[in-house]
Image (cartoon, rainbow, N blue to C red):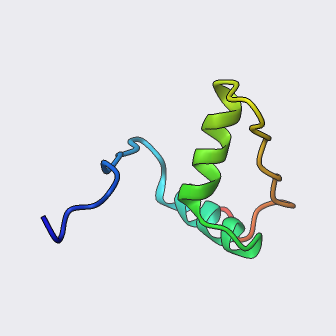
Amino acid sequence: MANQHKHSLRGLRNIPDDLWTEFEIATKQQGSDRSAELRRFMEWYVGRPGATLPKRSAGPRTPRL
């Protein structure tokens, strides 16, 4: 189908909105995006050859509520 994605959609549950927003801001400031960084972390976590742990952000980008 023309509108079908190449990869299956994955859902994450129980992530607070403020954390999801902070993560988005931090990844953009690193020149990346949430999906890429989550994928890199998962590859490192399961021990895929050549996988490296993503660079950690300097800290919170938005005030905590």
Apparent side of residue 12 relative to residue 49 in the rendered image (left or right): left
Compared across the picture, whether 19 is left or right of 13 comes to right
Q: Is residue 30 left or right of residue 36?
A: right
Q: Does residue 65 show up?
A: no
Query: Residue 46 location, x and y as percent?
Result: 64, 24
Q: Looking at the image, is 13 positioned above or below residue 55? A: above
Residue 44 visible here:
yes
At 61% from the left edge and 36% from the top edge, which residue is drawn?
42
- Locate the N terminus and report the quarter of the image it occupies: bottom left
Q: Quadrant of the C terminus?
A: bottom right
Q: Is residue 20 above or below residue 32?
A: above
**Residue farthest left in this picture:** 1
Asked if 27 appears above or below 8 in the picture, the reply is below
Examine the image and state in which quarter residue 41 appears. Answer: top right
Residue 25 placed where, x, y %? 65, 71
Q: Is residue 51 above or below residue 21?
A: above
Q: Nearer the viewer, residue 20 or 33?
A: 33
Q: In x, y percent, where is residue 2?
A: 16, 71
Residue that appears at 40% across and 44% down: 12
Q: Nearer the viewer, residue 45 or 18?
A: 45
Picture quarter containing residue 63?
bottom right
Residue toward you, 51 or 28: 51
Residue drawn at the location 67% of the way across and 73% of the way down: 28
- Counting from the top left corner in percent of width and height, residue 32 is at 67, 68
**Residue at horizontal 35 percent and vertical 46 percent from the top:** 11
